[in-house]
Image (tube, rainbow, N blue to C red):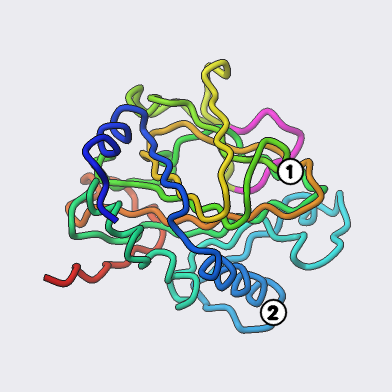
Amino acid sequence: MALSAEQRERYWQDGCLLIPGLFPRATLQRLETRFLELVTGRIPRPESMVVMRDIAFVKGTQQAESPVHEVNKILGFEDDEVLYSHSLYPALLSAVRDLLGAELMTLTTNVFNKPPGIDGRHPLHQDLRYFTLRPEDGIVATWTAIDATNRENGCLCVIPASHREGLYEHGDPDWPEFNSGFFAARGVDLERRRHLEMQAGDTLLFHPLLVHGSGRNRSQRFRRAISTHYASAGCRRPPGKRKRDPMMRRIPDPAP
């Protein structure tokens, strides 16, 4: 899938671009089935994969209805062939290459699980807070809805054009308890928020400086999404910076 000139301009202007229906239902079902197999222990997990439990179950403030309810996200699925097929999906790679160029590597991968009855919020933040690679324009995040997302089940919200405002100061969320590694951007104008309701298979491409987050799941169903961050092969870690980036993997170049 090649992006049009208008789509590329919208990405750089707003810091994000929504591509409807990029993934078919059958592919999403395969990804979701694999997620469930991994978190329930029906298949062994790669050593490099981290399954993060929600803070409510780590601290024992809630009791889980099932092992799936405990999971906040999977981090690092590069060594799982099925989940990593999201990162290698030709239509997705084509769109990302239109923004970053042909030579890519995956920077980090996640499956997000937002169970019903769990707080599950993710504070407004910028992904560049977690990365040391630069330049920032050489990184693109992709977020694919496995289930339909809306205000009720905690869809993404973004601050359009915030990628042009530099890296905000980040600190702990102003909540009683929050998951490990969650940081909140300081001084965000909440009046600028735009909530993005998406259908299953829709994919958002966004800049690593775009301020974004998600709300509580107030519905009675799960809300899941899968995400891959890509970096141009030309990205580098500035001298003297401590290595902090997750697993990186070179993607084969497109066929000539």
> Which residue corresponds to mark 1?
217
The span from disc 1 to disc 2 (Cα, nearest Å) is 25 Å
Whether 174 is among the magenta residues is: yes
Residue for point 31% across, 59% down: 93
Local SS, label 2: loop
Give the answer, above or below, for where 51 lies relative to 214.
Answer: below
> How far across and how far down the image is residue 156, in percent?
57, 39
Whether 142 is among the magenta residues is: no
**Mark number displayed over residue 230:** none
> Which residue corresponds to mark 2?
41
Check the picture and name the quadrant holding the C terminus.
Answer: bottom left
Q: Which residues are magenta?
A: 172-180
Q: Residues within 10 Å of mark 1 (few under 14, many from 20)?
A: many
Residue sitting farthest toward the bottom = 43
**Main secondary structure found in the magenta portion:** loop
Give the answer, above or below, for where 110 lies relative to 250.
Answer: above
Mark 1 belongs to which amino acid? Answer: Asn
Q: Residues within 10 Å of mark 2 (few under 14, many from 20)?
A: few
Camera-nearest residue between 238 and 214: 214
